[in-house]
Image: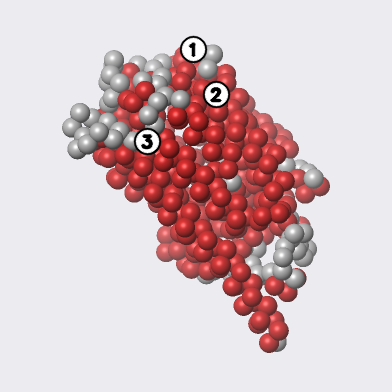
Amino acid sequence: MKDLQGLGHLFACAFLTSFAGSIVIPAITDVTMEALCPGENQCSLAIYLTGFTQAMTGLGTFLVTPFVGNLSDKYGRKTLLTLPMTVGILPLVILAFGRTSSYFYWYYFFKMFTGMFCDGSLQCLTLAYVADKTCEERRISAFGVLSGISAAGFVSAILIARFLPTSATFQVSAAVAVIAAIYMRIFLAETDGGATLADQSHRPLFSPYPPSDVESPAKLPSLGNGFSPVVMFSLFRSSMILSRAAIVAFIDSLGSSGVQASMLYYLKAQFQFSKDQYADLMLIVGVAGAISQLLLMPAIAPIFGEEMLLSAGLLATCANVFLTSFAWSSWVPYFSSTFVVFSVFGQPCLRTIVSKTVGPNDQGLAQGGITGISSIASIISPLLFSPLTALFLSENAPFDFRGFSLMCGGFAHLIAFALSFTLCSAGGSLRRKFSAGETAV
């Protein structure tokens, strides 16, 4: 694919970064439980601390990521990528040295504050980099490949974690994170901020609309020399598609954050899952997601379009979460995780819709803004799901349904699925309105 030339080094960085962050996931629940509640299968303190970290990270992402995205529009994606890729190494190094309670609390402290800056910024900047390098008709495939490469890094990490002792897991993670940062600084070329594409007229190859029916890029408000949440909300009010995409992103993230904070603790309490079972489950998720995004999504996206695939992805997520919440045997979570073949369509499709709505010079601002909107859900979600999870996993639950908090997250995904159809209608009506305006002139 000619449009993907020049993205090889970014994909390598994405793979290494995903590998470094993912290899510790199967072990971190056991490390947390052992540090906070030794010998227990259920620990309310661990659940509340996880929720608090998620809320603080979401707050930082909401405040920082749109600002970082805007700076990258001015000063370059590579320049801004250097900071999160470097700062994110520190928490991994701490657990590489030890996993006792004192080391864990230091890790917890630094992970929370580095996550406020790093988590959303990495996603925003890599998506903006891809948008700089690809034209609109190839962008959904490029975003899918980027997600697929990250999923491949996830699969490789989980596979290796399955056979590594816990101490070596964190040492490998820290070493790979250092390699990723060095590789990025040496090999990744700075983009031109989309200037090459700005002078070209790109009409989607498979668009059902004639050239005059394609919606023009949204006019975004200028941030001037600063940033505030008010400006970010003004950004999404500037376009009907952007505003509806932001609502879908927020509600979907609310469900995802709740499920993410609850899932591992639910599996441990319900089926006594540990590091190896977590790794097996994550391998299924990662392999299915990588194959889907690298092979299936590029093949069917031009046929069905990003709006339809977004709805399909959200529906599959609902099915996965609901089935897991009612799991009656330990094999059920493994089976339900196969729905990820379709659920991974959601984020690349949503990001493609946002990317196509704005011009080449506003990609960092728009991607940072949608990440900031999504992160608000990470602030609210722990307030709702952490007490709910702790209650229904305890002996004082009002009724015997340990997956109740997961089911509530599934309902959030269901609402996002219903609202995703408004993006299809918004896109169609705006195109027709623009066409009528052109005719009138």
Tell me the kind of residue under disc 2: Ile
Q: Residue at x 30, y 21 (%)?
A: 41
The residue that disc 2 covers is 158
Q: Position of residue 54 (x, y in %)?
A: 38, 40
Query: Which residue reaches farthest front?
Result: 328
Q: Is there any visible trace of residue 100 in the rendered image?
A: yes
Looking at the picture, tell me which residue is in the foreground, 145 or 185: 145
Tell me the kind of residue under disc 1: Pro
Q: Residue at x 30, y 29 (%)?
A: 46
Q: Position of residue 381 (x, y in %)?
A: 35, 46
Mark 2 is surrounded, within 10 Å at the Cα level, by few (under 14), some (14 to 19) or many (20 or more) other residues, namely many
The residue that disc 1 covers is 165
Q: Residue at x 66, y 56 (%)?
A: 305
Mark 3 or 1: the one toward you: 3
The residue that disc 3 covers is 326
From the viewer's perspective, is residue 247 above or below residue 164?
A: below
Q: Residue at x 33, y 22 (%)?
A: 33
Q: Position of residue 215 (x, y in %)?
A: 65, 70
Quarter of the rendering occupied by the C terminus: bottom right
Q: Secondary structure at mark 2?
A: helix
Q: Is residue 182 left or right of residue 107?
A: right
Mark 1 or 2: the one toward you: 2
Q: Is there any visible trace of residue 53 in the rendered image?
A: no
Q: CA distance from mark 1 to mark 2?
A: 12 Å
Sequence-first tag of 2 and 3: 2
Looking at the picture, tell me which residue is in the foreground, 375 or 93: 375
Q: CA distance from mark 3 to mark 1?
A: 32 Å
